[in-house]
Image (cartoon, rainbow, N blue to C red):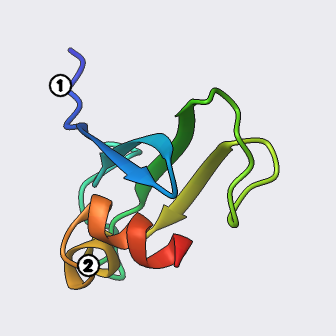
Amino acid sequence: MTEERNITFGRIVWNGIAIDVSFEPDWLSLGERANGSLVAHLTIRSVEPEKQPLPITETGYRSHFTEPKQIANAGGPVSFVQAWLE
């Protein structure tokens, strides 16, 4: 039996560039590990113009792993990415 993935999606416009943001708080579907943390996955992709370089990626795509509490502390995935771009 496979577990359903919990992925949220958002879009922002930063300096005229449309950017898609996806966030999966438990990327490995393991739940909390022995140390009490989860592995979260954040994906950032410039979509209009496509593959437009950003301050956090030269290719317009960035895959980032972190703890979900860091995303929550920033106000959510979109707010985290906006702050990172600034």
Instruction: Please report the residue visible at 68 percent of the width from the left and 56 percent of the height from the top.
Output: 54
Residue lying at the far top of the rendered structure: 1
| Amino acid marked by disc 2 | Lys
Instruction: Please report the residue visible at 46 percent of the width from the left and 42 percent of the height from the top.
Output: 19
Q: Is residue 78 left or right of residue 39?
A: left
- Secondary structure under badge 1? loop
Question: 14 or 26: which is nearer to us?
Answer: 14
* 77 in relation to 1, above or below: below
Residue lying at the far front of the rendered structure: 16
Instruction: Give coordinates of residue 8: x percent, y percent.
Output: 21, 40
* Label drawn at residue 64: none
Label 2 – label 1 distance at C-alpha: 21 Å
Mark 1 is surrounded, within 10 Å at the Cα level, by few (under 14), some (14 to 19) or many (20 or more) other residues, namely few
Instruction: Give coordinates of residue 49: x percent, y percent.
Output: 61, 30
- Please tell me which of labels 2 and 1 falls first in the chain: 1
Q: Is residue 59 left or right of residue 37?
A: right
* Pointer 2 residue: 69
| Amino acid marked by disc 1 | Glu
* Pointer 1 residue: 4
